Amino acid sequence: MPDQFEQLKQKYQPVLDAIQKEGAQLQNVNMDGNQLYIKATATSEASKNRIWDAIKKVDPNFADLKHDILVDEKTQTYTVQPGDNLSKISKQFYGDANKYKKIADANKLDDPDKIKAGQQLIIPAA
């Protein structure tokens, strides 16, 4: 029979998967008393919110979980993918497509509609 740590880890596996999918850095997974403790650093507030949504999907009360999900506020870079536009990138990093101008300004883009796949963009902290 699996111990409590393994049971809780299995229960919250969708959260651990979400952390990985979001590109967040997982720092710690262990037991704190009778609760599973997860510590991670997300790349943006929007990413943190998606991880939080994953927690609530597993268990809206999460009484058996302690978590410390932080946001790394430093400036990041992003490589433009085919089909990307600044609004889509803004939505991904800030949770708001209308903050695209912040990215455009940080990259001194005269025309925010003219980005191309493979281009490196600076993504300033929210």
Image (cartoon, grey):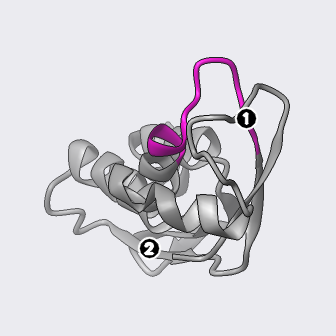
The reply to whether the C-beta atoms of the residues labelled 1 and 2 are less than 8 Å apart is no
Whichever of callouts 1 and 2 sits on the residue coming sooner in the sequence is: 2
Q: Nearer the viewer, mark 1 or mark 2?
A: 1
- Which amino acid lies under the numbered mark 1 shown in the image of this protein? Val
Of residues 43 and 88, the one nearer the viewer is 88
Residue located at (69% from left, 35% from top): 115
Residue displayed at 58% across by 46% down: 112
Q: Which residues are magenta?
A: 79-89
Q: Is residue 72 magenta?
A: no
Q: Dot 2: few (<14), some (14–19), or many (≥20) neighbours within 10 Å?
A: some
- Residue 115 drawn above or below residue 67: above
Q: Is residue 7 above or below residue 48?
A: above
Give the spatial CA distance, label 1 vs label 2: 32 Å
Tell me which residue sits at (36%, 49%) in the image. 97
Q: Nearer the viewer, residue 115 or 64?
A: 115
Q: Which residue is mark 1?
A: 80
Residue that carries the numbered disc 2 in the rendered image:
67
Q: Amino acid at mark 2?
A: His
Q: Position of residue 120 (x, y in %)?
A: 84, 46
Is 109 on the left-hand or right-hand side of 89? right
Residue at x-position 69% and y-position 69%? 106
Left or right placement of residue 14 versus residue 109 in this view = left
Q: Helix, strand or loop at disc 2? A: strand
> Vertically, is 9 above or below 61?
above
Q: Is residue 118 visible?
A: yes
In the current view of this chain or complex, which residue is farthest to the left? 61
Residue 20 occupies quadrant? top right
Q: State the SS at label 1.
A: loop
